[in-house]
Amino acid sequence: MSVDAATVRRIAHLARIAVSEDEVPHLQGELNAMLAFVEQLSEVNVEGVEPMTSVTPMQMKKRQDVVNDGDIADDIVANAPATEGHFFLVPKVVE
Amino acid sequence: MTDLTSLTLAEARKGLADKTFTSLELTDAHLSAIEAARVLNAFVMETPDQARDMAREADAKIAKGEGGPLAGIPLGIKDLFATKGVRTTACSKILGNFVPTYESTVTSQLWRDGAVMLGKLNNDEFAMGSANETSCFGPVGNPWRREGSNTTLVPGGSSGGSASAVAALLCMGATATDTGGSIRQPAAFTATVGIKPTYGRCSRWGIVAFASSLDQAGPIARSVRDAAMLLRSMAGHDPKDTTSVDIPVPDYEAAIGKSVKGMKIGIPKEYRLDGMPAEIEKLWGEGAAWLRSAGAELVEVSLPHTKYALPAYYIVAPAEASSNLARYDGVRYGLREQGKNIIELYENTRAEGFGAEVRRRVMIGTYVLSAGYYDAYYLRAQKVRTLIKKDFEDCFAKGVDAILTPATPSAAFGIGEKGGADPVEMYLNDIFTVTVNMAGLPGIAVPAGKDPQGLPLGLQLIGRPFEEETLFSLGEVIEQAAGRFTPARWW
């Protein structure tokens, strides 16, 4: 499989990465090189094989359903580019 | 006492305990070495004041007989580990001047045991790379050069700063992370020892995430024993990482010098690649001979799905990365580029903040997870991963204790030499290491020799899950036989 220019623009938008028109051909080439490389997986017989979901066979630990952290709003917003009080500021989303 | 930087961690521990020198002296010696080696670009942030404070504290504890296992030992920290109050960037512009308000579990355990932080080490942006060339702080120089040449070579990646700093004697050991070979490949390129432990052995909490089902922390050190000492402090269960395993951490150092007599070592025939350089082939044979003369039994084994590990990795890792890196949106931390609306703000921020390699991987990951392609790519890759893991399980079920392979397909190369036209050329660096991440196994790279141009080469040992001790015992045999390698100082 390979991607065309329109697909490159669509993926970029899905990934929320602005891509200029003159970057598209170059990106298309690189993505297609990667897709050509992974193409060899299609020759593997995966009939009846379970996909790996856990690297080590273990039961996932469940923590107690209790509040064990919090009251750190100052910490949470400390690195934000724009805040007001304990809120993150973003451009207007709802008209 | 200019030679304090040339000690191994084990020797420094003895000197500190015997009061031959203080941690402050040891730390100062390394801080001077760092200053004199800035041309290597191994450190992206030096923290001398904090280092001296931590050293004084360690000295006080040692004096009272309360020093921990790493008391007073100066270390470098890969910039992927969150360090409280000290800028952490993953060497990406998108994190900007991010200053964590918390400490990663792994580093907090090192400080608990008395270690001293010298500063933060360079790495490939978000650990995506095999040459440390994708860092927003620029490439790292390898302390090793070809004989008779002034060309600066790469130290490998993504833990290039860690490997370069340890090899150049700027720190006694360093933290690193390994998603596809990022500890073992740079260790092999710089004649240092690097171990990626079993998935789940070290907590991932507080480490900037790349591909969560593959990422594991581990040390890069000057000797096998040093690596064992560091891993003991770094490993352990952490309730904050559900994939961290709740089993006791052994005294890894006790495995050093243990007999390997009767151990069965597998030599996988699929790792014998067409066109493999003669020096790699020779090194591999020598490693096998050393283990044989130490009493191990060498057997040929088969890992039939080996060739599919790298392509499957280049689906799984970018897929997980595209998801993990969705958090960098210009809202909660790091860089923000303005836009007419919030979507444009996201798109402009991520276009400006991510480097070319990261953008490429996020896009490929987005594509393989997108509607209509998920089954063909991601699901198939995860099935192939099951088969790769089964290859190893079958091999271990036949009584094989560990597997010996070359660590890399070549020695270090020049900056800008690879991957310019085709990204896959760079990816092939990880051909021998990536299988280990796909199967979640432990793997160690140990310096074993040099190529005809005088550059270091390493061997890799792959172990059963949670049997890092076997790797330390076998690694020690190789180190004893091959000797240790130090680069000639040119910086």
Image: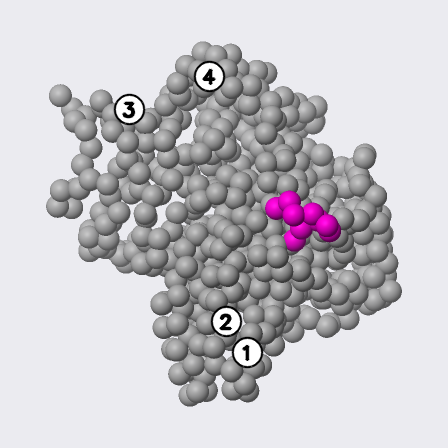
Q: CA distance from mark 1 to mark 2?
A: 8 Å
Question: Which mark, by number, is residue B194?
Answer: none
Which range of residues does the magenta coloring cover? B144-152
Residue drawn where x is 16% and y is 24% of the image: A94
Q: CA distance from mark 4 to mark 2?
A: 50 Å
Decide: is B223 above or below B12. above
Q: In the picture, residue A95 is in which quadrant?
A: top left
Q: CA distance from mark 1 to mark 3?
A: 57 Å
Residue receiving disc 1 = B1
Q: Amino acid at mark 2?
A: Ala
Q: Nearer the viewer, mark 1 or mark 3?
A: 1
Q: Amino acid at mark 1?
A: Met
Residue receiving disc 4 = A24
Could you tell me which secondary element the residue under label 2 belongs to?
A: helix
Q: Nearer the viewer, mark 4 or mark 2?
A: 2
Q: Is residue B2 left or right of residue B238?
A: right
Q: Is residue B49 left or right of residue B256?
A: left
Please say if the residues under marks 1 and 2 sit with CB atoms less than 8 Å apart: yes
> Quick one: label 4, few (<14), some, or many (20+) residues within 10 Å?
some
> Mark 1 or mark 2: which comes first in sequence?
1
Could you tell me which secondary element the residue under label 4 belongs to?
A: helix
Q: CA distance from mark 3 to mark 4?
A: 18 Å
Q: Are marks 1 and 2 on the same chain?
A: yes
Q: Nearer the viewer, mark 3 or mark 4?
A: 4
Please say if the residues under marks 3 and 2 sit with CB atoms less than 8 Å apart: no
